[in-house]
Amino acid sequence: MTEGAMNGMNRSCLYSMLLSQLHGTCTPLHFLKNQRSRRAKRPPKVAAKQNSGPSPLHNNAIMSRFSFLVLLSFLLFVSCGRYQAAEDFSASDSTPDPNELSEEILRTIRAGQDATAMIDQLAAYEPSQLVAALQTREEKLAFWVNVYNGVVQHLLINDPSLYDDRSSFFSGDLFTVAGHTMSPNDLEHGIIRGGENRLGLGIIPQFFQNKFERTFKIKGGDSRIHFALNCGAADCPPVAVYSPETYHEQINESTRKYLAKHSEIKTEDGKEVLYTSPLFSWFRGDFADRGGIDDFLVEFGVVPAEKEDIKREYTDYDWTLKTGIWAE
């Protein structure tokens, strides 16, 4: 190829490149142009923002923790308060001894008389007066068991329809003691059972009880009360009038008699099975105060010691309304 031809080709290529550049199809020049264009359009670098303090999310987290601590402190504070004993309390006609009043309520109802005036006297006490009067464990247990049995009998004798909806009856605020309105459940589980959860099987306690229940609850409970409290059902224990001086003897007798009536050992497929009250199942944890259910059954003569591991079955409970079941 001659030099002229080469020069002609170079001119042709140069012409083609110039022409393609005009049409925007020449890669080298087009690429360089685009690169320059991108650099020209690139926004200037912005300096990183200086830390101006915690973010809103961080502040919210701090406030949430603070609110939780305030609420927890409040709950702990209110859960510690209790009524204090009155310094100048003494029994009189207007403010009778609480144990004597609770006993008189039951005797009046058993005699078929109206106990409304005495129920009203229960309401008229000051909490501080009850604290002053109920000093011993026996005084507390005898009083509250009598009050429970007395108000339940009083309510159901005067208005049996209350029992048509048992759930509402047991959970309703139906009577007042020392200015505090309460339900049968409040009295049984919050005070007599020592602050146990109603559905906790005697294992799960109540949390954050009110001041009245914290003041008067029987610490540690007493598993024998399940054979002393009468809720109005046909299978409930007979009502006895408990006195502090003889409380233990009386409730031991009530427990033995009830279990003797509601327990039976049967032989099934060559093995002995104890059929007994479902109260043991519903409140199983309560019986730990006497070594557990097995030891309890041995202690009160239901099974001999050598058979304490006998298989247990629980009978059905008769919830039919039946007031006026009195201990002999």
Image (cartoon, grey):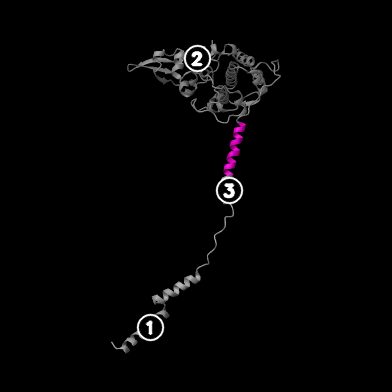
Magenta region's main secondary structure?
A: helix
- Depth check: give the residue in front, 63 or 156: 63
Residue to which mark 2 is pinned? 255
Measured Cα–Cα span from mark 3 to mark 2: 61 Å
Query: Earlier along the polypeptide chain: callout 2 or callout 1?
Result: 1
Measured Cα–Cα span from mark 3 to mark 1: 68 Å
Measured along the vertical axis of the image, is residue 262 above or below residue 282?
A: above
> Can the viewer see residue 243?
no
At label 2, which amino acid type do we have? Thr
- The image quarter in which residue 325 lies: top right
Residue to which mark 3 is pinned? 59
Q: Which mark is residue 14?
A: 1
- The residue mark sitting in front, 3 or 1, is 1
Measured along the vertical axis of the image, is residue 301 above or below residue 171?
A: above
Residue 67 drawn in magenta: yes
Judged from the image, the secondary structure of the residue bearing numbered disc 1 is: helix
Measured along the vertical axis of the image, is residue 190 above or below residue 253?
A: below
- The image quarter in which residue 214 lies: top right
Q: Which residues are magenta?
A: 63-78
- Depth check: give the residue in front, 302 or 325: 302
Which residue sits furthest top?
328
